[in-house]
Amino acid sequence: MSAVVLALAAGAVVGLALGALGGGGSVLAVPALIYLLGFPPAAATTASLLIVTATSLTALYAHARAGNVRWRAGALFAAAGLVPAALAGAVAARLPHWLLTLAFAAVAALAAVRMLRCARPDDGPPRQPSAVRPVRAAGSGAGLGALTGLLGVGGGFLAVPALVTVLAFEMRAAVGTSLLVISANSLASLATRGATASGLDWAVIAPFTATAVLGAWDGKRLAAKASGPVLQRAFAVVLLAVAAFMAVDAVT
């Protein structure tokens, strides 16, 4: 199967995840770029950031139109993560490939466990969000920013559980708000990755990004129809499988 066909298929899945869950696109994009399309880990994380930035901005627009974005809390999360994202992005290019792969697997597994624990029914009236606690929100945002810069992940797969558990957001608001965080963190990390962007295969990245953007719109429609906990559990299972495969690959 040609690289372009694989890129188109992988992009559709990444976009669907971002649009439906407000995160998770990057934890699928990086393994797809490495194992399906042959990118080295450092280049894969940079390419993932490019793809996720374009896709998350598209999905953010769709969710904002539906009123699913809490701008104040999202801005606080995003602002706290900008500097850590930029610093970690500068460090990532200097780390060995096996360490990046193993760290990525650990983060994916953690995200899967948290998504399983945070999945809850959407029945009944949505919970009212608690007051934004600046210290806790800023601390979570800084941690997500560091992960974005280091591993090329947007951070949405951790931002969504954090918004649900720390700030008591309902699932739809957490999904929409996380896309604002992803967009800001990814842009900050990209600003430090000029060296790893020079040799990227744009003939693969362009179709990957195009289908991811289209998939994000489909994901937004899916999120409006499907049960949030069902989507979370299904995605968590996929994440655990990806984490296990990457961990084995890193240590063998």
Image (spheres, helix red, strand yellow):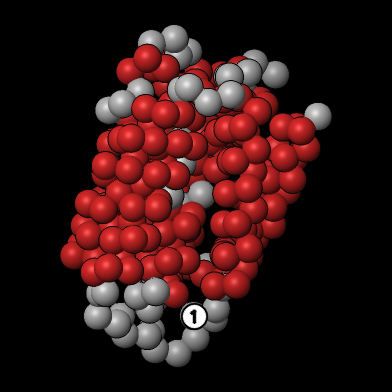
Q: What percent of the width, then of the height, locates residue 237?
A: 69, 57
Q: Decide which of 120, 192 is in the foreground and name it.
A: 192
Residue at position x 30%, y 80% in the image = 129
Residue at position x 22%, y 60% in the image = 76
Residue 112 found in image quarter: bottom right
Q: What percent of the width, then of the height, locates residue 245?
A: 75, 40
Q: Is residue 28 left or right of residue 74?
A: right
Q: Which residue is mark 1?
A: 122
Residue at position x 68%, y 45% in the image = 243
Q: Visible in this render: residue 51?
A: no
Q: Decide which of 127, 72 is in the foreground and name it.
A: 72
Residue 123 lies, with reference to residue 11, above or below; the image says below
Residue 229 lies, with reference to residue 7, above or below; the image says below
Q: Secondary structure at mark 1?
A: loop
**Dividing the image into 4 quarters, which one contains the N terminus?**
top right
- Disc 1 marks which amino acid? Asp
**Dividing the image into 4 quarters, which one contains the C terminus?**
top right
Q: Is residue 212 left or right of residue 81?
A: right
Q: What percent of the width, then of the height, locates residue 33?
A: 57, 27
Q: What percent of the width, then of the height, locates residue 32?
A: 61, 31
